[in-house]
Image: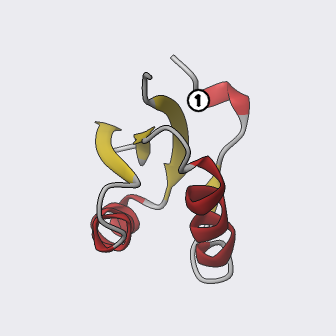
Amino acid sequence: MKTIKKFLRVDRREICYLKFILEAYDGIATLTTIDAHQGIVMLRIAPGCEGDVEAVLQDLKKDIIIDDSEKYHL
């Protein structure tokens, strides 16, 4: 199975924070910075972990701005 790509825009100061949070969940997703200046990142989500990643993102949205609209897809 292939990983699922999800593009997000976050405050660029929060990229490292988001990366470290996802890394704490061993293997559910990896984060790649696409455009550091604009805060655009790509998540590669492991098959079957989509719900877990979505739950983490929804919880993080309480503390940081995460824009997951379709306009960031490349």
Numbered label tally = 1
* Colour scheme employed for the rendering of this structure: secondary structure
Percent across and percent down for residue 37 are: 33, 44
Residue 15 to residue 67: above or below? below
Q: Is residue 2 visible?
A: yes
Q: Residue at image x 50%, y 56%?
A: 10
Residue 48 to residue 5: above or below? below
* Residue at the bottom extreme of this rendering: 63
Foreground: 49 or 41? 49
Q: Residue at image x 38%, y 50%?
A: 29
Foreground: 43 or 38? 43
Determine the image quadrant of residue 26: bottom left
| Residue that carries the numbered disc 1 in the rendered image | 72
Q: Residue at image x 69%, y 68%?
A: 58
Disc 1 is placed on an element classified as helix
Foreground: 2 or 9? 2
Residue 71 to residue 27: above or below? above
Give the side of residue 47 with respect to residue 65, left or right: left
Percent across and percent down for residue 33 are: 29, 41
Give the side of residue 50 with respect to residue 25, left or right: right
Determine the image quadrant of residue 41: top left
Give the side of residue 20 with respect to residue 71, left or right: left
| Amino acid type, callout 1 | Tyr
| Quadrant housing the N terminus | top left
